[in-house]
Amino acid sequence: MTTQEQGSRTIYLLLTRSETYFSRLIHHFTSGEYTHASIGLEGPKGPFYSFARKNPRMALPAGLIQEHADRGFFSLHPHIPCCLYALAVSEDTYQFICRRIQVMYEHRERYRYNLLGTLACLFHLRFERRHHKFCSEFVAEVLCESGAVELDKAPAVTRPMDFCALQNLRPIHRGAVGSLVDAA
C-alpha cells in the first residue's frame, strides 16, 4: 500500500478529563492526564462516539452515545481539558470503522457501560462482557479490528492515556473542550 493510500482519510480521537467523581477515581488510580476516550469521523465538532452517560446530568444509565463539543455533557462543562488527535488511515480502514460504529450505534439499546470492566482495568485486569464496553475499550477495539493501529495490550485493559503513545497520532488541539468548536 502506498503512503497516499495509507493516509487518504482521517479519524479523530478525543481524550478528556472531567471533574465527575468517576473521572476523579480513574485519575486517582492512573494519574493519567485524560480519563475518557471517544472516536470521531467528521472532525473537531464531532460527533464523537463513546461509552458514557446517556443523560448529561446523571451518571447512569450509560452506554453507547454520540458526543458533541457544543452540546450535551461537554456544553455543561466546556472548561474540561481535552486533546484531539488525528489519525490518517486508508479508505478501506475508514469505511470499516464507519460501518462498525454505524451498526453499533443503530443497535445502541443493546449496549451497556462496562463498569466492572472499567474497575478491573484500573488494576490491569481483563473483565469482558458481551455488549458491555467502557470508553477506551470501545475505541481500542474499533481501532484494532479495523487494522488502524496495533496495541501492545488487549482493548479490555486499554486506558485513555495509552492512545497518546501511538506512533501515527497527530495532536491537532489541546485546551478546553469548549474551544473545539473554534478549532474546526
Image (cartoon, rainbow, N blue to C red):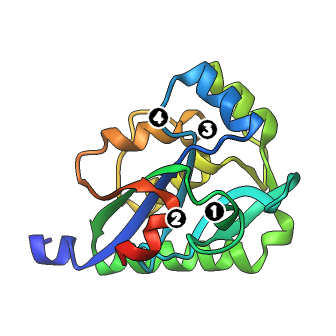
Question: How many neighbours does mark 1 have within 10 angstroms: few (below 14), some (14-19), or many (20 or more)?
Answer: some
Left or right, residue 44 beside residue 101: left
Q: Which one is earlier in the sequence, the residue at label 4 or at label 2?
A: 4
Question: Residue 99 placed where, x, y %?
Answer: 55, 79
Question: Residue 183 placed where, x, y %?
Answer: 36, 72
- What's the amino acid at mark 4? Glu
- Residue extending furthest toward the front: 79
Q: Nearer the viewer, mark 3 or mark 1?
A: 1
Q: Identify the residue under disc 3.
A: 156
Instruction: Identify the residue at image location x=70%, y=27%.
Output: 25
Question: How many neighbours does mark 4 have within 10 angstroms: few (below 14), some (14-19), or many (20 or more)?
Answer: some
Q: Nearer the viewer, mark 3 or mark 4?
A: 4
Q: Identify the residue under disc 2.
A: 178
Q: Which one is earlier in the sequence, the residue at label 1 or at label 2?
A: 1
- What's the amino acid at mark 2? Gly
Answer above or below: position of 71 versus 63.
below
Distance, label 3 to label 2, CA atoms, is 29 Å
Q: Which one is earlier in the sequence, the residue at label 3 or at label 4?
A: 4
Q: Identify the residue under disc 1.
A: 74
Question: How many neighbours does mark 3 have within 10 angstroms: few (below 14), some (14-19), or many (20 or more)?
Answer: many
Q: Which one is earlier in the sequence, the residue at label 3 or at label 2?
A: 3
Q: Is residue 49 visible?
A: yes
Answer above or below: position of 112 versus 64.
above
The reply to whether discs 1 and 2 touch (Cβ–Cβ < 8 Å) is: yes
Q: Which one is earlier in the sequence, the residue at label 3 or at label 1?
A: 1
Q: Nearer the viewer, mark 4 or mark 2?
A: 2
Left or right, residue 183 beside residue 179: left
Q: Identify the residue under disc 4.
A: 33
Question: Residue 91 placed where, x, y %?
Answer: 31, 81
**Residue 71 or 97: which is nearer the viewer?**
71
Which type of secondary structure does the marked residue at label 4 adopt? loop
